Amino acid sequence: MSAPNKSYDPVEVEAVKPDEVARHRADALAAIAAATSLDELHQVKIAVTGDRAPLALANREIGALPPAARAEAGKRIGEARGAVKTALAERQEALEADRDARVLVEEAVDVTLPWDRAPRGARHPLTTIQERIADIFVAMGYQVVDGPEVEAEWYNFDALNFPPDHPVRDLQDTFFVAGKSTGEGQDAAGSGMVLRTHTSPVQARTLLEQGAPVYAVSPGRTYRTDELDATHTPVFSQIEGLAVDEGLTMGDLKGTLDHWANAMFGDGVVTRLRPHFFPFTEPSAEVDLQCFVCKGASVGDPDNPCRTCGSEGWIEWGGCGMVNPRVLVACGVDPERYSGFAFGMGLERSLMFLNNVQDMRDMIEGDVRFTLPFGMEI
Ligand code: DAH
């Protein structure tokens, strides 16, 4: 601070001269207006209002003025400082408003974005169809039984009356576990294990475990050495049915299949049996399902083709027959007292015509986009 001024001499107190004050005031206001962020404004505020700010220094010089000049200089500097303060406050408010508007845009939450970032899966339609069929049979008093997918050759073939070394075994293009039995040399027996080629071995297991009478269905996975394409897959699923009791006839078999067809495909849908051969049933038949879409109306009517049955009126569904007495004997059941029927259907095939699935590969790829549209039937 300068020494007190006895006689007012504005030259001696440069800082408080009106021009100087006006210049400091203008500089400060310009700096405030030029601040483009709250941080910048904070720095400007220190520069224009802090202890070292020109107007603060000028204020301190007031005391060096002669008393007569102090009031006017004080008013001038006070006004300048007031204007700076007001400008700071206004700029602060404007920059805060800018920031708030920007934050609103930048941090906006789009409530229309999908919220389901971890979408739920869906039950596979093969699982659902197995449960639907099992339910139909449970309602008729059947049990649901299970068997291993790695199965002894004996259950898969021998117990079911497939003769040893008979080419009929090759009909089912088997995956042998650790080698096929050759009957010769060290590896004569092979491992004796296969990936089951059908669910029929569960028939033998159930009869051996429970004896007769027995009523059971067994859904599950089966394997054959097929290439994967639109209509074949080396891993597929079947459902097996077995009923052994006193006095069962083919009429019981037909009635059971018709009831199943009605329950699953609609009232009045019937089945038809065509003679066939399976080693484990005698007589044996292939089961056709009446087309549940056109009910046969598309046959011979080129104007109304049916996609579901290919205008055949019938859809191949599976195999069936009366349990061969040799199977009953192999499983310790007296064929003089008991008779039985059995049937087996492919589940992928059933799904294909039930839901118009065109490509079997979709069923095994595990893509949830295939599975979801089937819904969450439980
Ligand atoms: N196991 C047969 C197959 O895989 C299907 C079959 C036919 C099962 C007749 C049966 C039956 O129970 O009686 O082709």
Image: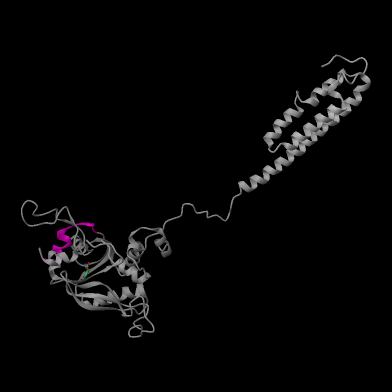
Between 345 and 34, the residue placed more toward the observer is 34
Q: Quadrant of the C terminus?
A: bottom left
Q: Is residue 9 above or below residue 167?
A: above
Position in image of residue 43 (x %, y %): 70, 30
Q: Quadrant of the N terminus?
A: top right
Identified at 37% across, 60% down, the residue is: 124
Q: Quadrant of residue 137?
A: bottom left
Identified at 76% across, 28% down, the residue is: 49
Between 98 and 374, the residue placed more toward the observer is 98
Whether residue 144 is visible, yes or no, is no
- In the rendered image, the residue lying farthest to the bottom is 300
- Magenta stretch: give its range: 147-163
**How many numbered discs, if any?**
0
Position in image of residue 114 (x %, y %): 52, 55
Q: Is residue 21 above or below residue 138?
A: above
- Say whether residue 133 is left or right of residue 77: left
Q: Quadrant of residue 300?
A: bottom left
Residue 360 inside the magenta-drawn segment? no
Position in image of residue 167 (x %, y %): 12, 66
Q: Quadrant of residue 289?
A: bottom left
Q: Is residue 99 above or below residue 202?
A: above
Assign ligand 1 to one image quadrant: bottom left
Position in image of residue 67 (x %, y %): 92, 19
- Say whether residue 27 is left or right of residue 109: right
Between 291 and 41, the residue placed more toward the observer is 41
